Image (spheres, rainbow, N blue to C red):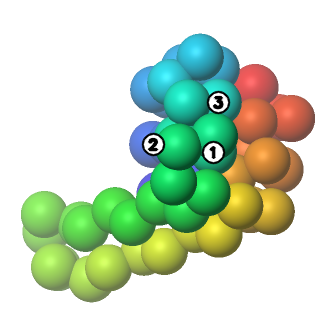
Amino acid sequence: MANALASIGKKELEDIIKEDGRAELVCHFCNKRYQFNKEELENILKQI
């Protein structure tokens, strides 16, 4: 799921960090929820 967040682009990920400081994704195959806190989002952003 981290790769999915990385694929939305640097600008969009920066906006999520600034506005919400967290993200939640739901897998459409298994309905599992994946939650990312601000630190995790910033680490994903660094990898882009």
Determine which quarter of the picture holds residue 6: top right
Of 13 and 2, nearer the camera is 13
Residue 21: horizontal and vertical position, in percent? 61, 57
Question: In the rendered structure, which disc, 1 or 2, sits on the residue that comes first in sequence?
Answer: 2
Amino acid type, mark 3: Glu
Q: Are marks 3 and 1 in contact (CB under 8 Å)?
A: yes
User: Label 2's element?
Assistant: helix
* Relative image position of residue 31 (x, y in whole percent): 16, 79
The residue shown at (24%, 66%) is 27
The picture quadrant where one finds residue 18 is top right
Q: Which residue is the site of mark 2?
A: 4
Say which label, 2 or 3, has the lower sequence index.
Answer: 2
User: Nearest the camera: 44 or 22?
Assistant: 22
Residue at the image position 83 percent from the left and 50 percent from the top:
43
Front of the two marks 1 and 2: 1
The residue carrying pointer 1 sits among few (fewer than 14), some (14 to 19) or many (20 or more) residues within 10 Å by Cα, namely some
The numbered dot on residue 14 is: 3
Label for residue 17? 1
Image depth: mark 2 or mark 3 in front: 3
Under circle 1, the secondary element is helix
Q: Nearer the viewer, residue 7 or 23?
A: 23
* Residue at image coords 51%, 54%: 20
Amino acid carrying label 2: it is Ala
Left or right of 8 on screen, residue 30: left
**Measured Cα–Cα span from mark 2 to mark 3:** 15 Å
C-alpha distance separating marks 1 and 2: 15 Å
